[in-house]
Each structure stands twice: as structure tokens, then as C-alpha cells.
Image (spheres, grey):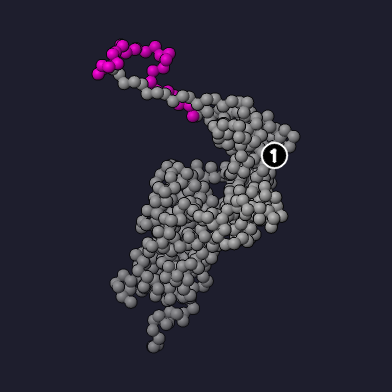
Amino acid sequence: MTSRKPDEQLARNSRLRLVRARPLTTARRAVTDGRNRPAPRPPEGTPPPAELARQAREVLAHAVRVARWAAADRDPGAGPLTGPARERAATELELTPEQVGAGWDRARLAGLVELHGAAVRPGWRLQAWDRDDSAVQRGWVALFDAWSLVHPAPDDVAPAPVAEVVEAVPQVLSLLQLSAGPVTVPALLDLLRQRVAELHEERCEVPYGPHPDSTGPVAPDLDPDSDLAPAPAPALAPAPEPVDESLLPPLLDWALEGLAAVGALTLGEGQATLTPLGNWAVWVKLEQICVAAQSPAGNIEQSAQHMLRGCARLTPGPARAEYRAWLAARTVGSAVTELLAVARGEDALLRGLAFEALRVVGAPAESEVRAAAADTSLRPYALLWLAEYEGADPEDASEVLTREESTWLWVDTAAAVADHGESDLLVRHLESAVQGNVPALLDEVRALGHPRTVQVLVALAAAHPDPALAKAVRRAAFQVHTGGS
């Protein structure tokens, strides 16, 4: 017979110590780790990620220098590069003012810098630039998506044909990618003409009401002042004017030059060829389209709750693409409100996914997320979001949480795993707790007051293969259920 208290025995039992502490970012991914589909393989001949990142770093070299100077080397809180600041940057960086201006624009488009009011801060991609190849690739893809802003359209062309050419460019890029080599400009021009004509036809509306050439019965003439006189027919919107085909060759040249300016293709004598970066980016875009097509039907048109459920089985990249598409179809304010309403619900999985979608929203969601930090159930998620938004590395963002907030997030994530994951995921989630051993974890969980504590502990006890640990967890669940200590 021993005199030690049960909790002391548990603490001394090495089997009940948590093997290693995993960062909370790992815990946040625990729910979906078991549902990730295998990553698709890029086309044969695509350089490895490290080489693609090296090429992207070359394209954005000036932008990175300007971003670091603007967001880190200047006085803290300094504003955008305008006027004297641009001249000063040109002098200190040994660049021309034009190069500084171009680098600044690219830095903003690639997410290397962020404007918070009048202050410039380094974006998370800039902080990860030298060590995270995937961050470099995503930054370059953001620049690739904004090619028409990097290389503005001619001033003497109306916005409508420019917009149609921009919308048709993905088909031009698809042809370049399928050709796997140089494509002549005349061939690209033929495709552009065809696609622009299709876009024009899609936007033409069939006019309602009688046609001038109609041979149907005609109403008798009536006094316009009579009560029986028909209401005047509504004016029909004029059909869109056909695009002047003489504009397409110069606009194609403009588009190819813009894509070349961001490193997506190279231009030769009367021909264009995708660079390895451009070829990879087009493949990524096509893959995203395929994933979206395979996701639950109508995701983008559904409510936030249904959209998030539809994204639960997607890997992070395709899920972010779904979030962006869903957000693009709504005003920012209403989208943020709807996502936070879902986050306040009972489903912990949707709570975590809602904040992943809010990460895609970025700056426009800041004020609403700050307000959400006052809500106990949302506070850990909101604090992590704000830390990452303000530039913290995602792996280190958990340092902003108190021990109690970290434990709340641990229980909430465990609830999501218990509801939607597999038992082995719940067992592995135990390792992400900040406490060093199971008794300490159970003591703090019992005192926490999380509404799902009992269900989480019961599920963990049922899933864990160690009888001693399962018994301790089951006893803790009973104590919480009965209100004991």
C-alpha cells in the first residue's frame, strides 16, 4: 500500500508523460491530416521546387530589396514610398527612382509588404523569403496573377476591350502550356480572336418585347391619355458593341509583354514560349480548376457553413482557392460577418476553417477579428490570426497565447478531431498539449470550463491504447461531469 496520492503516481508514471510538444499550428491541422488527397505531380520536365523558387527570387530581386528597405531598414512606422522617400531609397539602394517605383509596386502585388493605415510593415512572405521556397513561389504567383497591373494597358484603348483580352489570356496561356514549346504570335492571335468573340456572344442578351420586324398581332391604336392605354415599353439596353479587331494585335503584344515582364514567358522573333515558372503556374491554375470542379457542387454559391464543409477534405492550397472564389462573389463585410457567425457555432472544425478563410481575407477582416477576440470561444483563434497578420511566423504565433488560451484551443481542436477525425488522430493530438504530462493537462482541462471537455476526454479515453492513461482520462471526464475536483 502506497501513501502517494493518485495524481502523484500518475505524474511519476513515465508512460503518462507527453512525449513531445508540437506547435499549435500542427494541432490546427490535425483534423484534416487524415483526409488529404495525394498531392498531384506537376508535368514531366518541371524543375524541382527549389529551382522554381530560385527563378522566382531572381524575378523579384529588386522588389525584395525595396521591400526590406521600406518595411525594415527605414524608420519604424514610415509610410509608402512616395516623393522624397523614393529618391532616398534610390540613393541608398543604388537604383534608379524608376526601378524603386517598379520594385515597390511589385512588392505590394507579391505580398512582400503590407500597408497598415499609413505604416508599412513586412509581409509574412518577406520574412520567410530566404528560408521558405513555397512562400517564394506563392509570392511570384501573386505577381503573375497581377501581370496586367505590372504592365499597364495603353492609355488610348478603351477599358472594355482591355478587360476582354485579360479575360481571354488564360486560354492563350493554356495553348502555350499544351504546346510545350514556342507558339507563333499569329496562332495566338487566332485563339485570342476566337475567345474574345465567344466572350462577346456570352454577354449578349436576348431583347425582350416585340421586335421591330415582328409579324405578330398588333394592338389597336389607343389614346395615350386613356386608362386603357398600354404602359410604355421599357427601353432596351443596347447590345454590346463588337470589339474592333484592329485592336487585338496590339493588345496581344501588350499581354505578352506583360507576362514576359513578370517572368512567365520569353518572347522571340514572332513567337512566345512559357518559362519553367510560367509553365508551372499555368499547371497550378488548371489543377485548381479541376479540384474546384471535383469539390461538392455549388460550393461557391452556398452559405459559409456549407462552403467550409465542402472544403474540409481539400488540401490547404485548393481550399484557399475555394475561399478566394467564395469571397469574390460577396462583399467583404458580409463575408466576414458570415464566417464569424459560423465560427461562433458549435462545430469546432468549422470554427478553425472559418479562421483559415479569414486569413485569405487579410486586412479588411482585421477590425472584426479584433472584436471577436473578446469572445472566449474565439479568442485563441483571433489572437493567432492577428499575430500572423502582424507578421509573426505561423510556427511561432502560438507564443501570443496564455497557457489557459492554449489549453482552450487544444480542447477545441480535440473536439473537432473527435467529431470529424479518426481515433489515431485524437491520440496524436495529445502530443500537441503545452503541458508536460497528462496529470497537468487533466488538471488544467478540468478547471477550464470548455463546454466540450467531457466529450473530448471520453473520446480520448476510448481511443488511447494505454490502459493507465485511458483510466486517468476517464476518471477526469467523470469528475468534470459530476462537478467533482
The answer to whether residue 185 is seen in the rendering is yes
Span shown in magenta: 203-228
Q: Is residue 390 above or below residue 298?
A: below
Dividing the picture into quadrants, the one containing residue 224 is top left
Q: What residue did someone put label 1 on? A: 273
Q: Is residue 97 above or below residue 220?
A: below
Residue 219 inside the magenta-drawn segment: yes
Q: Residue at x 38, y 68 (%)?
A: 457
Q: Position of residue 245 (x, y in %)?
A: 61, 26
Q: State the residue in front, 417 or 192.
A: 192
Q: Secondary structure at mark 1?
A: strand
Q: Residue furthest front?
A: 84
Q: Amino acid at mark 1?
A: Thr
Q: Residue at x 54, y 32 (%)?
A: 160
Q: Position of residue 211 (x, y in %)?
A: 41, 17
Q: Position of residue 60 (x, y in %)?
A: 66, 51
Q: State the residue in front, 95 or 363.
A: 95
The answer to whether residue 138 is seen in the rendering is no
Q: Position of residue 116 (x, y in %)?
A: 51, 56
Q: Is residue 204 above or below residue 258?
A: above
Residue 431 inside the magenta-drawn segment: no
